[in-house]
């Protein structure tokens, strides 16, 4: 298996913020899962787990773990927790679906 390209190193403040986010339970499941991924992948506190081990512990795909790591390293904590804004919007096709009054 190749070496990890995206190494997650959280500051103490970021780690505490993620732990609070998880313990609250008032946020979306996606945010909680991504916060768990970042805490398990953190190399500054302990030896981080492999992507496959993190995925097995949280019951998600290893590819999701890889994507969360990459977004954290490239775009930061908020971007790793929140969903991407879709750049491409398709215009709705209303032909034939309009109600005639």
Image (spheres, rainbow, N blue to C red):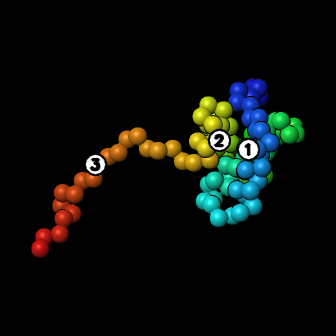
In primary-sequence order, the first of circles 1 and 2 is 1
Residue under pointer 1: 14
Q: Are the residues at dot 1 and dot 2 in contact (C-beta closer than 8 Å)?
A: yes
- Residue at the farthest left position: 101
Residue ID for mark 3? 91
| Residue identifier under label 2 | 77
- The image quadrant of residue 64 is top right
Work out whether residue 29 or residue 25 is closer to the camera in this orientation and state it.
25
Numbered label tally? 3
- Image quarter (top left, top right, bottom left or bottom right) of the C terminus: bottom left
Q: Earlier in the sequence, mark 3 or mark 1?
A: 1
Residue at disc 3, secondary structure: loop
Q: Quadrant of the N terminus?
A: top right
- In front here: 78 or 1? 78
Crowdedness of circle 3 by 10 Å Cα count: few (<14), some, many (20+)?
few
Which residue extends farthest right? 46
Vertical order, 2 against 98 (above or below): above
- First in sequence, mark 2 or 3: give its number: 2
Q: Secondary structure at mark 2?
A: helix
Asked which quadrant contains residue 4, the reply is top right
Q: Position of residue 60 (x, y in %)?
A: 68, 51
The answer for how far apart the CA atoms under marks 3 and 1 are is 39 Å
Residue sitting at 71 percent across and 63 percent down? Answer: 24
Q: Check whether the beta carbons of the residues at disc 3 and disc 1 lie within 8 A of each other.
A: no
How far is mark 2 from mark 3, CA to CA?
Answer: 32 Å
Q: Nearer the viewer, mark 2 or mark 3?
A: 2
- Are there few (<14), some (14-19), or many (20+) residues within 10 Å of tag 1? some
Please name the residue shown 74% across and 31% down the image. 7
Q: CA distance from mark 1 to mark 2?
A: 8 Å
Residue at figure coordinates x 18%, y 65% from the top left: 98
Q: Are marks 2 and 3 in contact (CB under 8 Å)?
A: no
């Amino acid at each position: 298996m190749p070496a990890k390209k995206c190494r997650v190193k959280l500051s103490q403040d970021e780690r505490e913020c993620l732990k609070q986010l998880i313990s609250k339970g008032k946020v979306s499941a996606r945010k909680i899962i991504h916060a768990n991924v970042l805490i398990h992948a953190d190399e500054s506190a302990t030896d981080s787990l492999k992507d496959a081990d993190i995925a097995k512990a949280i019951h998600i795909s290893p590819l999701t773990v890889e994507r969360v790591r990459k977004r954290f390293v490239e775009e930061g904590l908020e971007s790793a927790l929140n969903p991407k804004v879709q750049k491409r919007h398709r215009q709705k096709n209303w032909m034939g679906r309009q109600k005639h009054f």
